[in-house]
Image: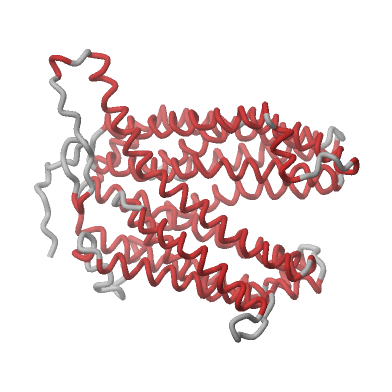
């Protein structure tokens, strides 16, 4: 049975939170501290708490990328055709997985607001319905994955590569639902400001994945040589194991087991499912619109030529890597804003959102400087500067990185503002902004200026920069103008 604190007992930076989450207080004498220092202290405390939550989230995403990179490397050892088939199937799988995880984007703000408002009895039903939402979302995705070969052929891909890619994702599909359940568990822990367990499980998954890949793909340790199918089986097995380990941790942890999360698991409330869908579907559309514009830019770049496509791939990979930091800060912003909004603390809610924005935009100065001043050195990691046939691609890649430097602040701003707005359960408006910015500005201008008018790859990257800037400015403005109303709405829903 849960022991609930008094209704008016609100977590502050000076008081311990439930389940052992503590925030250090600064016990200096207010009469001996300058007024400017007193005003700055809450912001510094919020920055420390946000980064304490964000760092494990950032490392978790990077570790997941390392796991996928291991798969790609070992596919390459089997041959270029195997790698191509694996990439085709893997991209389709990842797109559907990204959409499904977007639907589950409602889990963090819902749980965070319950915890902030001390509605602890609502945590178990919210968790239960999140698990059911994951199961419901997985069904259509798994059906599409099972027929990946036909879908890839319809998209104009080589039938033989499409067939090989289908065998890969059919082996992988059995891990689709477990990985969604793993995401729900990770959001539960993040809402409790305890993301380290998720990080540890994912890091352990890297080694397990690499060892199982080596064994099943190449027939080591007495196992059959399964090639690409072995890679898919490994992904499914590791997904199941990571979910099982994290579930065991959550169920046995003394600060979480009091929820009895699996109690009455078969009891489903349609209204709660509808709330998760109402919040989550716009998040999924937002995620897909952002991923889709970069995929579309890749397809457009392929129309220009091989050198432009290679340069685009390098610049895009570099941008994606540094994006992991503002992305992690954005996830932390969702939790921090959601908890403070649920607690009805207007000032702290606004401070949490603006702190995340300042941290994300502040970090973006570093990669922007690196792209601008050290673009040649970065490209040298990917392409041999001494080979004359690489010169065109190298020059393009360096110029693309210079354009990427220009939109780093905008990209960080749109990511963190999006996270803060999600903490306030504002998802529909940001979805419309993302669609208008990425596709109304980014795609149309890329196609018109880059392809139709013939200005090439530079026009495509400038269009991407314009789209990210428009979306970033509008999302920050929305948080500035809408947050008071949304905070009041969260307070009244408490």
* The one of 278 and 401 positioned closer to us in this rendering: 401
Q: Residue furthest right?
A: 388
Residue at position x 24%, y 58% from top?
Answer: 122
Please state if 153 lies on the left or on the right of 252 as rendered. Answer: right
* Residue 273: image location, x then y, percent: 37, 62
* Residue 160: image location, x then y, percent: 81, 74
* Residue 18: image location, x then y, percent: 18, 50
Residue at position x 50%, y 39% from top?
Answer: 415
Q: Is residue 240 above or below residue 424?
A: below
* The one of 379 and 169 positioned closer to us in this rendering: 379
Please state if 305 lies on the left or on the right of 239 as rendered. Answer: right
Please state if 404 lies on the left or on the right of 46 as rendered. Answer: right
* Residue 149: image location, x then y, percent: 72, 73
Please state if 230 lies on the left or on the right of 460 as rendered. Answer: left
Residue at position x 20%, y 54% from top?
Answer: 19
Count of labels in the image: 0
Q: Quadrant of residue 319?
A: top right
Residue at position x 66%, y 42% from top?
Answer: 439
Colouring mode (rainbow / by chain / secondary structure / one colour): secondary structure
Q: Quadrant of residue 399?
A: top right
The N terminus - image quarter: bottom left
């Amino acid at each position: 049975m849960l022991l609930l604190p008094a209704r008016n007992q609100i977590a502050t930076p000076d008081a311990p939170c439930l389940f052992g989450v503590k925030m250090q207080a600064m016990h200096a004498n207010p009469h001996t501290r300058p007024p400017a220092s007193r005003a700055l202290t809450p912001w510094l405390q919020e920055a420390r708490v946000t980064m304490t939550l964000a760092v494990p989230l950032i490392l978790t995403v990077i570790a997941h990328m390392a796991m996928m990179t291991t798969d790609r490397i070992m596919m390459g050892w089997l041959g270029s055709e195997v790698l191509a088939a694996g990439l085709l199937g893997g991209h389709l799988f990842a797109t559907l997985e990204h959409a499904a995880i977007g639907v589950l984007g409602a889990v963090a703000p819902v749980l965070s607001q319950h915890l902030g408002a001390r509605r602890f009895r609502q945590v178990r039903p919210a968790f239960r319905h999140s698990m059911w939402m994951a199961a419901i979302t997985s069904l259509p995705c798994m059906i599409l994955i099972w027929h990946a070969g036909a879908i890839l052929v319809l998209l104009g891909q080589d039938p033989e590569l499409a067939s090989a890619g289908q065998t890969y994702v059919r082996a992988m599909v059995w891990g689709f639902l477990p990985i969604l359940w793993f995401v729900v568990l990770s959001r539960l822990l993040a809402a409790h400001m305890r993301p380290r367990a998720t990080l540890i499980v994912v890091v352990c998954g890297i080694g397990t994945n690499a060892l199982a890949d080596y064994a099943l793909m190449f027939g080591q340790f007495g196992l059959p040589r399964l090639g690409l199918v072995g890679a898919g089986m490994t992904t499914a097995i590791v997904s199941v194991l990571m979910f099982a380990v994290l579930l065991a941790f959550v169920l046995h942890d003394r600060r979480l087991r009091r929820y009895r999360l699996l109690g009455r698991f078969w009891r489903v409330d349609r209204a709660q499912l509808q709330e998760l869908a109402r919040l989550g579907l716009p998040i999924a559309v937002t995620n897909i619109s952002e991923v889709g514009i970069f995929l579309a830019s890749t397809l457009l770049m392929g129309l220009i030529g091989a050198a432009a496509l290679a340069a685009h791939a390098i610049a895009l990979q570099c941008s994606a890597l540094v994006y992991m930091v503002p992305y992690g800060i954005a996830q932390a912003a969702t939790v921090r804003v959601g908890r403070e909004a649920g607690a009805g603390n207007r000032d702290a809610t606004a401070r949490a959102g603006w702190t995340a924005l300042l941290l994300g935009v502040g970090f973006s100065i570093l990669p922007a400087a690196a792209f601008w001043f050290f673009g040649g050195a970065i490209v040298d990691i990917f392409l041999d500067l001494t080979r004359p046939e690489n010169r065109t691609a190298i020059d393009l890649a360096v110029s693309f990185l210079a354009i990427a430097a220009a939109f780093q602040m905008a990209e960080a701003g749109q990511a963190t503002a999006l996270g803060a707005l999600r903490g306030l359960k504002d998802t529909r408006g940001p979805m419309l902004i993302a669609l208008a910015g990425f596709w109304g500005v980014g795609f149309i201008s890329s196609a018109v200026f880059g392809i139709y008018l013939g200005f090439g790859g530079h026009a495509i990257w400038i269009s991407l920069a314009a789209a990210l800037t428009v979306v970033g400015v509008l999302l920050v403005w929305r948080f500035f103008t809408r947050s008071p109303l949304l905070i009041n709405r969260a307070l009244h829903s408490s």
